[in-house]
Image: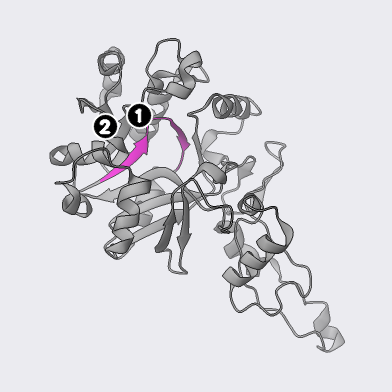
Amino acid sequence: MRQMVILAGGMGTRLRERLDGRPKPLIEIGGTPLLEHQVLLAKRHGVGRVLLLVNYAADRIAEFCSARGDWGIEVECLDDGEPLGTAGAVLGAFERLDDEFLVVYGDTMIGVDLTRFCAFHRSLPEPAFTLLLHPNDHPQDSDLVEMDEEGRIVAFHPYPHNLGHVFSNLVNAALYVVRRTALAPYRGMRGPLDFGKDLFPDMLHREMPLFGYNSPEYIKDCGTPSRLEGLSRFLLRSDCPLQSRCAAGGSIRRSGWYDQRPCGVDLPCRAASLTAGRGRGHRSPQSFRLSRCRRHEPAGDCARRLHDCRVAPYPRDDGIPVERRWRLPRPPLLLPASSG
């Protein structure tokens, strides 16, 4: 992927006390401005052009990029003149977009393997969008997503959420690969438009192919003081590289298994329940998931507990003795649950 679009037009109202007059994309994370973290990651993964969609303090952001020599790649700042929303800003830059490009929000710290993410997108059958999805620690105020077994998104639930409904903790992480032609039907729309609240639900209604890339790689919204503090503390916990960390804490081994030892913290990215009989009577993982949430979790909070549900073969209770010792699934049957 040769182009990344960074949505850097927000005022940072919730971070005003921490910004000290700076625009939100220039807030420092570990001594380096957030925008610089994003551009350097993109450059490491072969991105040669960055389009910054700016609004508030646009001149200061442009000056900062110029002072860094644009990091040796092509960086363009485009002032949209007025707040247009996440989707509205991208639509306003339609003529400057490549046929396929990355989109990331300007208040998001990312440690994602962008090369692998883009390769996944290219392996799909004519995708309009591919969204990076993950569990996080605040699903109650996040856009939640449902996928089918093929990885196609079948439902999109923008926040705020009705506490009477039960959803899995599968969150839109605000990192996309976009096919430019998918935006063409919306070019004539006016007014602020949001990807989560406006475009994605409408795209599903039109049966446009949206796919999810479910990954535990590190990506974290730092748009509030508490999240910014949590991010800063997390990055100081150990020497684990950001790219090896999970958004919910801990680290990831190359094999795809989760391991809390390198960073010394528990890793609540996935849950697997192996207690005998718990899945009886359920015809699908969704049925089991909803039952567990309704029976055992406070209303509106279950998404923070059960992140995924997978099916493994399970012998009958009355098997002969030599079979009973193999009743619990062996590790190869759990690999799909560990790799998402």
Q: Nearer the viewer, residue 102 or 15?
A: 15
In the shown orientation, is residue 249 left or right of residue 133? right
Q: How is the image coloured?
A: one colour
Q: Is residue 295 above or below residue 259?
A: below
Q: Which residue is mark 2?
A: 50
Q: Earlier in the sequence, mark 2 or mark 1?
A: 1
The CA distance from mark 2 to mark 1 is 7 Å
Q: Nearer the viewer, residue 95 or 9?
A: 9
Task: Give me the disc on residue 131.
Answer: none
Q: Residue 59 lies in what quarter of the image? A: top left
| Quadrant location, the N terminus | top left
Q: Which residue is mark 1?
A: 39
Question: Is 292 colored magenta in this rendering?
Answer: no
Q: Which segment is the magenta one?
A: 101-112
Place of residue 294 in the rendered image (x, y in percent of width and height, measured from the top left): 67, 62
Q: Residue furthest top?
A: 20
